[in-house]
Image: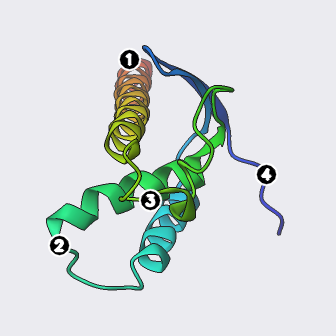
Amino acid sequence: MASSPPETYTIDVEGIGRFQVFRRTPRLSFAVMAEMSELTYGVEPLPSWLSAPAEVVSTLKVLVCQPDTGWPVGMGDPQGIDPLDPDHEPRLKMAMRVVAEVKKAEARFRLQAQANVEVAGGQAQEEH
């Protein structure tokens, strides 16, 4: 059974740009985890200094389907990140801000879904 493509949404990250993002599904959550495992060669537990950047790169690679036109090439590609590059730290901080906005949007979706469930539950009780 072929699955339909995931929904997308847009986030605006102040000072960085606009990104089209896949709405996270269980399948995409597994894809992020698999990407992170591949990126880190399955090393567990990851040292903290490596865990956050690995999560950021994996999340960007899997969930961002259309980056802003000014987005640095390679930020969703582990091969494009060079810790010896003087621009590495600022670029990583930008990437972390994008992922933080993705997580904020996901939190809003969860709250909205919870509110919809509560409204539907209240309507069902009124019918009885």
Residue for badge 4: 4
**x, y percent for residue 55:** 37, 58
Residue labelled with disc 2 = 47
Structural crowding at the residue carrying mark 3, measured as other residues with C-alpha within 10 Å and reported as few (<14), some (14–19) or many (≥20): few
Q: Earlier in the sequence, mark 4 or mark 1?
A: 4
Q: Which mark is residue 82?
A: 3
Around disc 1, counting alpha carbons within 10 Å, would you say few (fewer than 14), some (14 to 19), or many (20 or more)?
few
Whether residue 116 sits left or right of residue 60 in the image: it is left
Residue depicted at 34% across the width and 32% down the height: 107
User: Nearest the camera: 118 or 10?
Assistant: 10
Tell me which amino acid carries mark 3: Asp
Residue 114 marker: none
How far, Cα to Cα, is label 2 from label 1? Answer: 52 Å
User: Circle 1 is placed at which residue position?
Assistant: 126
Q: Nearer the viewer, mark 2 or mark 1?
A: 2
Across and down, in percent, residue 66 comes to 69, 36
Residue at image coords 58%, 55%: 62
Determine the CA span between mark 4 and mark 1. 35 Å
Disc 4 packing (10 Å; few <14; some 14–19; many ≥20)? few
